[in-house]
């Protein structure tokens, strides 16, 4: 009885979530290598490496971009290492600016709405309105998680022997197409199961706050770090632009030499606006993880809840900060990217091979009564 219910769930949930799972799998494959493909196909991201001391501060990057785009509001500079250009983001604009960090030369102004952005929108909300699409993606991911569990139950042999092991772990390439399709669904589904579960769980953490809160509770919660005293709300904040650029420079130096632990030349710095009392910076960007920092604009000291280096994080904090890396395969570099690419591609094929299995059984069930009728006549 339980096996029939499990098979019924696997069938109808698979039919319900099939199309979203195919889209998520294919777009996920593309996005795994987004940065690698961009580096290979552009001439403005990868540059000749120089020394740390030769990198220009955020103020120089700001002034260079402003001279080219005087009407644009500049939000932040993304330093990506000694051999990468600085990516500059603009407020209320779909353009990104790439600047040489050693000469301040503007290398390119590119449209953010490119092919990869299109793929990203499909992966996040299926090109639907964001509020609706995110819910569809979230619940489709939840259904796919159930499908992985029910699929494992269906895959598990009733008896383990030589024949069952061969059927469970190998594909019979010399068999008919129907059998090959079954093996592709059954065997490849098993081999990709672990990575698929990780992608599902991390995706669910991104999609649903209640799942995120549950994981935090189950893993023991965040470390008890005292909150740093907030900035003084009574301070005068109407500061000229030059002071804002000086603050950005000081925070950039401070992050690199006092706070950064990994990949120290990769730092994001936001340019404070007149009303901003805190300034955001980001460091330790390595393996798909990063470290958020907020500085008091006036004292240049950390404010809010302090985030320690990743190797000092407890289980909960490590999982939450590594969630993106675990979801995308960035956590282990090129090796895990390749593994995730293959697993994501397999996940995209599962609804297709599964549908063909169901369709073949349905056609067989329709033909049987006709044969019986002919025999009686």
Image (spheres, rainbow, N blue to C red):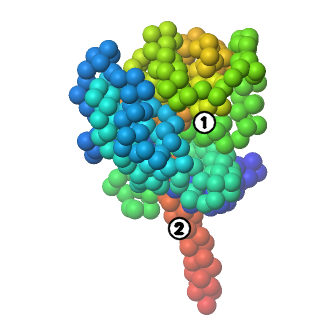
Identify the residue shown where x is 52% and y is 30%: 241
Which label was assigned to residue 202?
A: 1
Tell me if mark 1 has few (under 14), some (14-19) or many (20+) residues whose alpha carbon lies within 10 angstroms of its own: many
- Of circles 2 and 1, the one toward us is 1
Counting from the top left corner in percent of width and height, residue 60 is at: 38, 28
- Quarter location, residue 306: top right
Q: State the residue lying farthest toward the left.
A: 48
Question: Which residue is found at the position 60% from the left and 53% from the top?
Answer: 125
Assign the C terminus to one quadrant of the image: bottom right
Q: Is residue 265 above or below residue 122?
A: above
Pick the front one: 338 or 181: 338
Q: Is residue 82 left or right of residue 377?
A: left
Residue for point 40% across, 62% down:
177
> Dot 2 corresponds to which residue?
360
- Nearest the eye: 227 or 320: 227
Q: Indicate which disc residue 21 carries.
A: none
- In the rendered view, tell whether residue 5 sits above or below residue 296: below
Q: Position of residue 20 (x, y in %)?
A: 58, 57
Sequence-wise, the earlier of marks 2 and 1 is: 1
Residue 299 in percent (x, y) is at 62, 12
Say whether residue 16 is left or right of residue 55.
right
Identify the element where label 1 is drawn.
helix
């Amino acid at each position: 009885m339980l096996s029939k219910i499990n098979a019924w769930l696997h069938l109808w949930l698979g039919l319900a979530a099939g199309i979203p799972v195919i889209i998520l799998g294919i777009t996920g494959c593309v996005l795994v290598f987004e940065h690698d493909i961009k580096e290979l196909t552009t001439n403005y991201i990868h540059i000749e490496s120089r020394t740390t001391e030769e990198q220009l501060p955020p103020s120089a990057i700001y002034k260079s971009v402003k001279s080219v785009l005087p009407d644009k509001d500049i939000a932040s500079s993304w330093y990506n290492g000694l051999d990468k250009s600085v990516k500059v983001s603009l407020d209320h604009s779909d353009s990104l600016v790439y600047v040489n960090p050693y000469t301040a030369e503007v290398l390119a102004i590119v449209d953010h709405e490119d092919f990869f952005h299109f793929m990203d929108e499909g992966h996040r909300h299926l090109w639907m309105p964001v509020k609706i699409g995110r819910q569809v993606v979230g619940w489709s991911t939840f259904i796919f998680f159930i499908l992985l569990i029910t699929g494992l139950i269906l895959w598990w042999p009733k008896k383990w022997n030589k024949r069952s092991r061969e059927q469970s772990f190998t594909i019979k390439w010399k068999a008919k197409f129907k059998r090959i399709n079954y093996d592709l669904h059954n065997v490849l589904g098993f081999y990709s199961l672990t990575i698929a579960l990780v992608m599902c769980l991390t995706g669910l953490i991104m999609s649903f706050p209640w799942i995120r809160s549950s994981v935090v509770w189950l893993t023991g919660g965040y470390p008890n770090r005292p909150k740093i005293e907030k900035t003084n709300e009574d301070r005068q904040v109407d500061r000229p632009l030059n002071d804002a650029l000086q603050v950005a420079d000081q925070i950039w130096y401070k992050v690199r030499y006092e706070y950064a632990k990994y990949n120290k030349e990769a730092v994001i710095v936001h340019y404070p606006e007149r009303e901003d009392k805190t300034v955001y910076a980001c460091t330790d960007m390595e393996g798909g993880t990063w470290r958020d920092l907020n500085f008091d604009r006036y004292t240049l000291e950390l404010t809010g809840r302090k985030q320690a280096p990743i190797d000092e994080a407890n289980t909960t904090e490590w999982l939450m900060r590594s969630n993106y890396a675990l979801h995308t395969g960035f956590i282990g570099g090129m090796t895990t990217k390749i593994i995730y690419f293959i697993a994501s591609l397999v996940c995209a094929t599962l609804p297709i091979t599964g549908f063909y299995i169901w369709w073949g059984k349905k056609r067989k069930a329709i033909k049987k009564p006709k044969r019986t009728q002919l025999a009686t006549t």
